[in-house]
Amino acid sequence: MALLLAIVCAILIGVVGGVCAAVALGARRHEPVGPTLEEERLRVLAAFASATTDCFRETDPARRRTRMSAVAAQFGEGLGISPAMLTDATKTAAEALSVDSGLLNFKPAQSPLYEVLRDWARPQSGDTGKPSVDTLDAMMAETTLVQNPAGTPAMAAHSLDSQAILTAGIQDITNTLVGTYELNDLLRMILEAMYRGMGFTRVLLCIRDPAQNALRGRIGFGQDIDQVIKRGFSVSLTPARDAFYAAISQGADIFIEDVNGEKIKDHIPAWYRKLVPARSLVLFPVMLGKKPVGLFYADSDAGQPIKLGSAELNLLKTLRNQAVLAIKQHS
């Protein structure tokens, strides 16, 4: 594999280098870069990609935009592009990176390249109609699951108790999966293991409802859970700039220690605040491929913040993965 990658890189370098020289010569002669053969078109596309990448390496925004306009002019006739099309494509790329960041194990808020893409795609005139992209990225970076070591003997003892209960639950579910079972019964077993193991205030499983285009709360355990379900705990599948949609669209496991945190509060939807008085929450999406089919939700009310260590986190993820396996078996 390493040798193959080295060969591919060498070929690309040779092609791009040769085409860049040809492009430079064409530019000096004021000739449009217009490919006539498919092979030539691919070479020009490679040169265009290389030139665009070089522009994104430019640290000064004004100079970057000037260079990008020049690139669009140079390649415009041959590739059928304009500066406006290039801006739209860059905006689309930035949005796609943000949406798929969880699947790609990519954190937009920590990427210099994403900052450049976002800056290029941002309107130049003031646009106060919606929040800028970076607020959601900051929220996602802030809610990365933190693996907190137990700080006191009491906390360590509680952690060991949690691990024991979660592990026992996983074993019971594993035994159930190899036999005949009802899917709803097994999902209840998973919820109960989460609830008893971690001492959450509430746990809830939302299931996809195509008629409402949402993940609706179906079964759960904990304080006032029947009322929470009855009042309509429902996560819309319509794109929204909030923590719930970020989790299900990106397949990202999210832990929010304080829903009123400075970087978090604007991304907690109003429907949720009216429905649940929780301070901390955890979201574990249930994905089949890239499609969200369910969501495990757990929370803790004020005065009882959720504490997640690496062992507990891995066990909770295992329980979620067992749900995915069970759903696949019954699909």
Image (cartoon, rainbow, N blue to C red):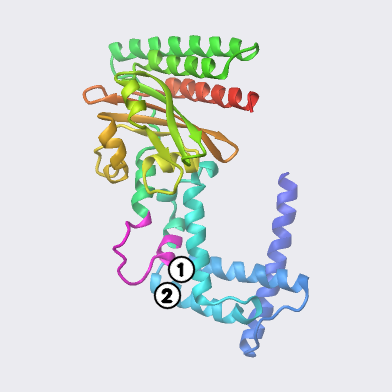
- x and y, in percent, of residue 269 in the image: 31, 42
Looking at the rendered structure, the kind of residue marked 2 is Arg
Q: Is residue 56 above or below residue 268?
A: below
Residue farthest along the left direction in this orientation: 303
Question: Given contact means CB atoms under 8 Å apart, are the residues at marks 2 and 1 in contact?
Answer: yes
- x and y, in percent, of residue 111 in the image: 44, 52
Q: Tell me how far mark 2 sits from mark 1, CA to CA.
A: 7 Å
Looking at the rendered structure, the kind of residue marked 1 is Glu
Label 2 environment density (alpha carbons within 10 Å; few <14, some 14–19, many ≥20): few
Q: Earlier in the sequence, mark 2 or mark 1?
A: 1
- x and y, in percent, of residue 213 in the image: 48, 42
Q: Is residue 262 above or below residue 38?
A: above
Residue positioned 45% across, 56% down in the render? 114
Mark 1: which secondary structure? loop
**Which residue, given by chain and number where applicable, does mark 1 sit on?**
58
**Which residue, given by chain and number where applicable, does mark 2 sit on?**
63
Name the quadrant of the N terminus: top right
Mark 2: which secondary structure? helix
Please state if 197 lies on the left or on the right of 16 as rendered. left
Toward the viewer: 198 or 6? 198
Place residue 159 in its image quadrant: top left
Toward the viewer: 32 or 168? 168
Is residue 258 visible in the rendered image? The answer is no
Please give the range of residues in magenta: 117-133
Label 1 environment density (alpha carbons within 10 Å; few <14, some 14–19, many ≥20): some
- x and y, in percent, of residue 112 in the image: 43, 56
Toward the viewer: 323 or 26? 323
Residue positioned 62% across, 85% down in the render? 27
